Image (cartoon, rainbow, N blue to C red):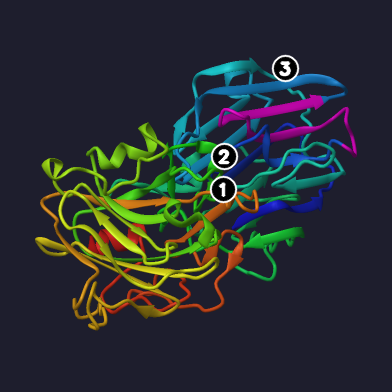
Amino acid sequence: MGLVATSYLSKTLDASNRKTWTFSTWLKVPCDISGQQTIWANSYSADSSNFAFIGLDSNYKLHIQSYASSSNVLNKVSDVAFIDPSSWYHLVVRVDTTQSTAADRVRAYINNKEVEKWTTNTIPNQNQDLGWQLNIDHRIGNQAGLNRNFYGLLAHTHFADGQSYAPSTFGEYDSTTGEWKAKLTPSVTYSTNGFFLKYENASNFGLDSSGQSNNMATSGTFTQDTDTPSNNFQILDRNKAYTIGNLDHSGTAYLGTSAALAGCFGTMYFIDGKWYAEFKPQSDRTTESATSIGIVKNGTHANLRWLNEGAGGMPGKETASNGCEGITYQPMIGTPNLVDDGGGGTVNYGVQASANDIIMMALDVSGTTGKLWFGKNGTWFNAPSTSNVGNPATGANPGISFAKGDEFWGISVSSSANQAANANKYIYCNFGRGVFGTTAVSSGNADGAGQGIFEYAPPAGFYAMCTKNLKDYG
């Protein structure tokens, strides 16, 4: 489930066990955090003397806090941070203030590893009642009375009232890959206020699957995302962006703020297989060359251009002596260009795009020679300087062919502002999650493996950029 703007789930819980409980959820953090972000909390506005929350601080660190009778009885900030917005994390907070050993009263785990170092570590007294499970409003994704929302993704959220469970109750190691994964039907005693939110019902994200009928009310706009702990989709890499703050929360859009070139790279790289993606430039034709879509070879100069150079750093501008390190397509200029100064030079290709056109890309790195196609609004372009229509499904008439080598290739995008209108503009990327920004695609086309949601049907044999497809086809 994706939370957008001020969306959240809420329920007034009965007064219950304030000493012992377990909260477990899978989460994917947003790419850009501003201030505190709440995952699970009670209402500050309903009872400011007994508020409590679990969330992230502005440094992506886990923060657990509880006031009781106006005293700060619990306040823990982890030393470790959730620094990778491209990965799913399993978070378990295990509370039992009846424990005689202070360190055992509030424990937290990330991917089955206990958090052992805390930069702030106020531990509750033995048998202390905490701020949760009062007869007031409790929320997932928001804290009433405080400006603390959550802009990431959540999956498999559990609350066990009166029970202190280890992470192994909710997760397990895959016997083949060794990866920590969710148990889909864990054995949990939920009790009075307990719940299990699967987020499977798009019309009722607050539906409780615990058997306790603790359904939550929905407020705001939600999205049901194809990105899950068992199938992780590509996003743009906040650690390889010219400006981190120019990424949207989901990591699928990059904001241009000047006429200069500046952009970002994707998180996934491909040494084999055939891959499909869609892009929707928000910019119009006045921005011209500053909006681009391309590919880069991992570990090369091209793969560092946005990060280290910013303006003027477009991949594809490598010299012939460096070889083919990057290729960039400029869809917004009058006669669009493919740029590969390390091999094919600059060639005219395709038809000029306007704002909100959907640019299709097909990348084939299955052989020794790589191939790259682009198209617009459902039609593939002719090969440069010909009337031969591109056909990725058959491998015919690519926009460019290049020496792939024994190398991994990834995605590059850039955007810029419309200076005439003095407006910042995004380039939206759909790697299979079915949205451009927060707007869902109008069609529902999956790839041949049944993965992803696209505006246009991926060519036969081409796949969405996600971990299940990487495992099977990459």
Residue 63 sits inside the magenta stretch: yes
Q: Which residue is mark 1?
A: 248
Report x, y in % for residue 445: 45, 78
Question: Mark 1 touching mark 2, by CB under 8 A?
Answer: yes
Which of the marked residues, 2 or 3, is nearer the chain's N terminus? Answer: 2
Q: Amino acid at mark 2?
A: Asp
Task: Depth check: give the residue in front, 437 or 307.
Answer: 307
* Mark 2 surroundings within 10 Å by alpha-carbon count, few (fewer than 14), some (14 through 19), many (20 or more): many
Task: Depth check: give the residue in front, 5 or 11.
Answer: 5
Report x, y in % for residue 368: 9, 61
| Residue beneath the point at 81% across and 32% down | 51
Seen in the image, is 150 located left or right of residue 395? right
Q: Is residue 411 visible?
A: yes
Q: Which residue is mark 3?
A: 125
Seen in the image, is 47 located left or right of residue 391? right
The quarter of the rendered structure image containing the C terminus is: bottom left
Q: Which residue is mark 2?
A: 32
Report x, y in % for residue 367: 12, 64
Which of the marked residues, 1 or 2, is nearer the chain's N terminus? Answer: 2
Q: Amino acid at mark 1?
A: Asp
Seen in the image, is 325 located left or right of residue 260? left
Callout 3: helix, strand or loop? loop
Report x, y in % for residue 7: 73, 54
Residue 116 sits inside the magenta stretch: no
Q: Amino acid at mark 3?
A: Asn
Location of residue 105 (image quadrant): top right
Which of the marked residues, 3 or 1, is nearer the chain's N terminus? Answer: 3
Q: Which mark is residue 233?
A: none
Task: Depth check: give the residue in front, 415 or 460.
Answer: 415
The quarter of the rendered structure image containing the N terminus is: bottom right
Residue range in magenta is: 45-67
